[in-house]
Image (spheres, rainbow, N blue to C red):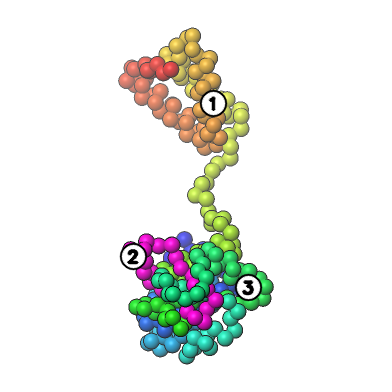
Amino acid sequence: MSGTDRSKEFPTGPGPVVVLVEPQLGENIGMAARAMANFGLREMRLVAPRDGWPNEKAAAASSGALAIVEEAKVYPTLSEALADMTLAFATTARERGQMKRVASPAQAMRESAGEIAAGGRAALLFGRERSGLDNDEISVCDAIMTFPVNPAFASLNIAQAVLLTGYEWFRTSQGEALPFDGEIRSPLAPRAMTLSFFEFLETALDDADFFPPARRPPMVRNLRDIFLRRELTEQDVRTLRGVMRAIGRRRKEEGDFGGDEEG
């Protein structure tokens, strides 16, 4: 569960209901619950789970999403599980020959969000591990939801299908802002700090006979432009000065502070 921050609030607001039709393995139910929790889905319904309910293997496989497993509701038939739904999507990887519109997960989640916002309820149906949903089960849904996958290997397990759908739901309901940007930056260097670094660098390069006399001014400007395009932070400048000092000390120790000319 690396990355879980228990100080954060679970996303609020209603979402689609995940309906697993005759799931066979408790482990798959638990992993589907975990996928739901990853993307803020809360409500799971089970239609006639093969091994009964509750299921210890489902709880163990939920990896922290135990509340979803414990609060899952069990129904003997699909009709009862869908009784209070106003919109239902049937997930399938195969064309079923039914006159139903077909939506991608992104399209289905946008429609689900609109239905929920209007006061309705949306259900997402996922079928059996071996055979998926049958045609009669698909026939009671408003539309088919399918995934853009490799047609030569299109089968997804339940947890994978729930995960992909949950991802699209989270994008729709919460936006695409990432939880962190991977960048911890010190403040931008004030111009006085940057100019002091330039003076330090240019003096070191003068000592190394780096600049051809006739070309020093444009080369200095070019060097400054290179660094300024990087939006140097205070830490950047401190690091660069440290690098230059270390190089200078080493060259002096070796008695060789010559530098190749660069144009």
Amino acid at pointer 1? Asp
Q: Is disc 3 placed on a helix, strand or loop?
A: helix
Q: Alpha-carbon neighbours of circle 2 within 10 Å: few (<14), some, or many (≥20)?
A: few
Cα separation, mark 2 vs mark 3, equals 33 Å
Quadrant of the frame with the C terminus: top left
Amino acid at pointer 2? Phe
Q: Nearer the viewer, mark 3 or mark 1?
A: 3
Percent across and percent down for residue 88 are 54, 77
Question: Could you tell which of marks 3 and 1 lies nearer the N-terminus?
Answer: 3
Amino acid at pointer 3? Ile
Q: Residue furthest top?
A: 214
Cα separation, mark 1 vs mark 2, equals 51 Å
Mark 1 highlights which residue?
Answer: 225
Q: Specify the segment rendered in magenta.
A: 138-158
Is residue 54 or residue 76 the one in the foreground? 76
The residue shown at (47%, 31%) is 240
The residue shown at (58%, 70%) is 112
The reply to whether the magenta stretch includes residue 22 is no
Number of the label disc, if any, that sits on residue 153: 2
Percent across and percent down for residue 67 are 50, 78
Question: Could you tell which of marks 1 and 2 lies nearer the N-terminus?
Answer: 2
Q: Is disc 1 placed on a helix, strand or loop?
A: helix
Q: Nearer the viewer, mark 1 or mark 2?
A: 2
Percent across and percent down for residue 98 are 47, 76
The residue shown at (54%, 55%) is 178
Percent across and percent down for residue 252 are 37, 20
